Image (tube, coloured by chain):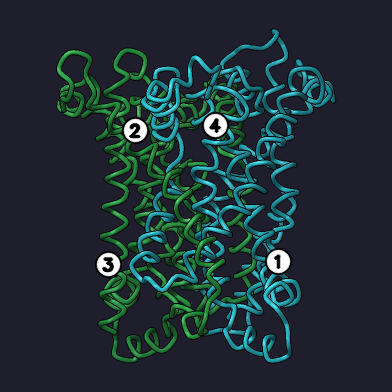
Amino acid sequence: MTVQSPVHTAPAAAGGGSRPKKSKSWLATVPLLAFVVLVFGVPLVIILGGTFTREGTLSAANVTDSLQGAYLTALLGSVKLSALVAVVGALLGTFLAQAVVTSRFRLLREAVLTASGVLSNFGGIPLAFAWIATLGNSGVVTSALGLDSAGWSLYNFWGLTLVYLYFSIPLMVVVVVPALDGLRPQWREAAQNNGANTWQYWRHVGIPVLTPTLLGGVVLLFGGAFAAYATAAAMVGGTVPLVTLQIANALSGNVLIGHENVALALSLDMIVVAGLVMAVYLPLQRRSARWLR
Amino acid sequence: MAALTPAGPMAPVTPPAIAAGPGGRAGRPRRIRVWRGVVLLVAAVYFLVPLIASFTFTVKDASKGFTLDAYGQILSAEGFGKSLLLSLGLGVATIVVVLLLTLPAMLAVRLSVPKLKPVLEILCTLPLVVPPITFVAGITTILQWGPDHLADTPFFQTIIAAQNPDFPVVLVLAYVILALPFVYRALDAGLGALDARTLVEAARNLGASWPHLLFRVIVPNLRSALASASFLTLALVLGEFTIASLLHYQTFPVWIYTISGSQAQVSVAVSVFSLLITWLLLLVLSSAGARQRSGS
């Protein structure tokens, strides 16, 4: 919340005097800033305040509760799932993007890029249902291949990973294709002229230039999987411990009397984790922009 | 919602970079071609099978074999029209509000108060860090706390009015926040490609008023950025489940979830259908973007 104090002072300073002719134009930013502070800032303050309040008194009990037992398992489960999805999705997405970028078929490239744009937004309830219809207990593929008798189940940690990758890989493709396009052929030619083989080219030129983009993609994928709620709710209900499911559970009243604010403490835990991971992303994005123009 | 990405649907809108040089390299090793074929094949199986299987699931019938009944039942299913209209209405309201808030602010920042740009950028990116479920935890707490403490003040009526189940304003407010990062990026890219200062000065010198300038000069020039911002917002609102379901509003995704218990085939049919619609919207958008590029 500290970022918000400059919001109020800055307009006055900027509009103060140096530009007498346009001194009113900062007013155009006021509605947006006020809206964000009110609609976004107030719930955040409430989360923060509620986290440290139990039954009307100041207390850290909610935080302690949110970091032990089933809640801790859920938080760790979410982090584990998101990290796995992020790393695997980034790797597979990069391979797919490279295969498409180096292809001579323009149509293939256009088709994959458009499909990636759509599929990277294919989340929530429809995604869960598409997979349930495919590999769920009475899914088409499940019954066609007789997977149910082989003990297959979609409704566990690995099933969720499989489903989350369905939007994560396309997202990685969308993120990494511009970077792969930015690898100039001259760099490769220069490396080859200097006697480098393919491995050496990637080791010393390709990967270092791509690293910020790749890490940025991992962060983005992590954030997407970490925040996902609808897909998990429709698919696994409560069988896989995830922090988003626990928050929804607590918000629906499934907590001990007087412990309602545990939902807010869990929310704060999530924001802290997501914030830490995102904090890595922003500087990286600037760095990769320098090379890939 | 989970994966709604700033880069996502915009990718086809940005000019496709010239297919890079590797075509020029002679004698590509056979190994690489095989490797590429395998990658593409595995990807095709992974991404196409669920789509084909979902479709099969909706048309398969134990007695008749093949039937499109599930798609016919979508229209007659109870609550379909109402929830879809609600979601579309929320989408339009969100687009109007978010554009009215961001466009003047971003224009002002670009033209005369560049000092505010970092502030705006951070504020508009922050919603990415806050997962929707935590946001809704804050909102529910306020909505529960409000009636207890504000009963005698005008705020009370406002809070009640914002929760009107026929048109929950509270959802519009929340969706505007969720859409901010995507709208900001789309408009920022659009404004960056535009010489806004020259346009504004020329229009002002010719005597245009500010509203005239905004709607007759800036908006037409930003058409494709505005279209992509609107599309992203609409896609977000039409797919958003977390906030609507936890605040107990029957929007379109919540409706799909509700009917899945009794009509599994119909709910999968709607899912397939909604993907097709998204695909169509995106194609329209990217071809509009391409046309504008070739025109300019």
> Is A107 or B42 nearer to us in this picture?
B42
Q: Amino acid at mark 2?
A: Ala
Q: Residue at x 51, y 84 (%)?
A: B26
Separation of residues labelled 4 and 2 (CA atoms) = 24 Å
Q: Which residue is mark 3?
A: B287
The reply to whether discs 3 and 1 touch (Cβ–Cβ < 8 Å) is: no
Label 3, secondary structure: give it: helix
| Quarter residue A67 falls in | top right
- Label 3 and label 4 in one chain: no
| Relative side of B274 to A19, left or right | left
Q: Residue at x 64, y 68 (%)?
A: B118
Q: Which residue is mark 4?
A: A229
The reply to whether discs 3 and 4 touch (Cβ–Cβ < 8 Å) is: no
Mark nearest the camera among 1 and 4 is: 1
The reply to whether discs 1 and 4 touch (Cβ–Cβ < 8 Å) is: no
> Is A18 or A233 nearer to us in this picture?
A233
Separation of residues labelled 3 and 1 (CA atoms) = 32 Å
Task: Write down the colour of chain A.
Answer: cyan
| Residue A263 x, y percent position in the rendering | 67, 24
Q: Which residue is mark 1?
A: A211
